[in-house]
Amino acid sequence: MVFAQDSIKKKCRSLLALVLVVGSVRAQTVGEVEDLVYRATCHQRQKYSLRQLEQDALLSEIARGHSEEMLTLSYFSHKSPNQLCETVRDRLRFGHRFSLTWAENLHKCDGYDANVIARQAVDCWMASPEHRHNLLNRSFNRVGVGVAHRNQTYLFTQLLSYETIAIDSLIVVPAPSGYQIEVRARVVEGPDQGSFFVNGLRRLDWKADASGCFCAQIQMQQPGLLEIGQAAGTRLWQVETSIPIPPPEMHLKHVSLPEMLAMPSWLQSLDLTALL
């Protein structure tokens, strides 16, 4: 009898090990598909002599969150039913990505072979004029790919953006006279100097150090937009970074599905966009 119990325990341990191994393979497969989509995207851009895109981990995280939400809530759209991250811009802002030039490609398919479904996603985008324009846009310099799947069904989200200034740290503290803001940023590409604009008015100049980094402290008297412009000539600036003040909390960049589904219906129905 003891032998039988030991045998059962051994079988259970073997089954558990098998489940853990299968789960690990599935996770690796999703990552493999994302990487294959990235490489296929770079291949298409190379064919047209376009610059290669930097694979961006945070953009991939935001994209993956949208794919997972679409799969869980059974919808397929750029617009989320979750008002906290309803639009692409909402999702980017929750990730503290404030670039003004971006695009999103979506794809859904069934399959098992990573190479096949990754190639199919990029081929379908290339066959669609709008998605092809996004993928081959010469302005974009960063990309993130997020994949979610259940059984043989796969959902793809590809986020492309043109980022000239990367925000490394953003601290916004309410003050009696408005907001005290500290920004630490770095130049990704373009001029290494420029100006901050508060609600369209030039407020403060900045100049990056040898490593491309710069920081500034700014006071804003009321909510609005804090924009970072790069000098493009005499009294001429190119603005590609626009930060809403106060910004959304970064940890809400994409509310986790368990948290969102556990929210009372009255809370899910609130229009929180006015607070963003």
Image: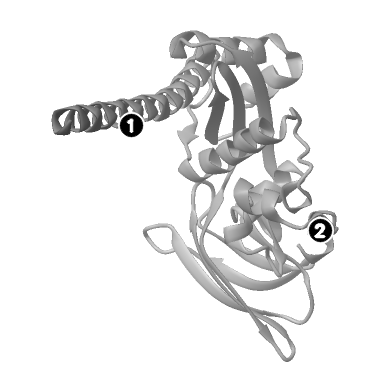
Examine the image and state in which quarter residue 141 appears.
top right
Q: Is residue 73 visible?
A: yes
Does residue 53 appear to the left or right of 15 in the view shown? right
x, y percentage for residue 61?
52, 42
What's the amino acid at mark 2? Thr
Query: Is label 1 in contact with label 2 (beta carbons under 8 Å)?
Result: no
- Residue 137 versus residue 249: which sits nearer the camera? 249
Q: Nearer the viewer, mark 1 or mark 2?
A: 1
Looking at the image, residue 198 lies above or below residue 173 = above
Quadrant of the drawing holding the N terminus:
top left
Helix, strand, or loop for circle 2?
Answer: helix
Residue that sits furthest to the bottom in the current view = 176
Looking at the image, residue 206 lies above or below residue 253 = below
Q: Residue at x 52, y 20 (%)?
A: 41
x, y percentage for residue 212?
43, 57
Q: Residue at x 56, y 48 (%)?
A: 164
Q: Is residue 240 visible?
A: no
Q: How is the image coloured?
A: one colour
Helix, strand, or loop for circle 1?
Answer: helix
Does residue 44 appear to the left or right of 175 in the view shown? left
Q: Residue at x 59, y 53 (%)?
A: 95
x, y percentage for residue 70?
68, 33
Examine the image and state in which quarter residue 148 appears.
top right
Q: Which residue is mark 1?
A: 20
What's the amino acid at mark 1? Leu
Q: Residue at x 51, y 45 (%)?
A: 58
- Residue 272 versus residue 213: which sits nearer the camera? 272
Looking at the image, residue 34 lies above or below residue 160 = above
Looking at the image, residue 8 lies above or below residue 238 = above
Q: Residues within 10 Å of mark 1 (few under 14, many from 20)?
A: few
| Mark drawn on residue 163 | none
| Mark drawn on residue 273 | 2
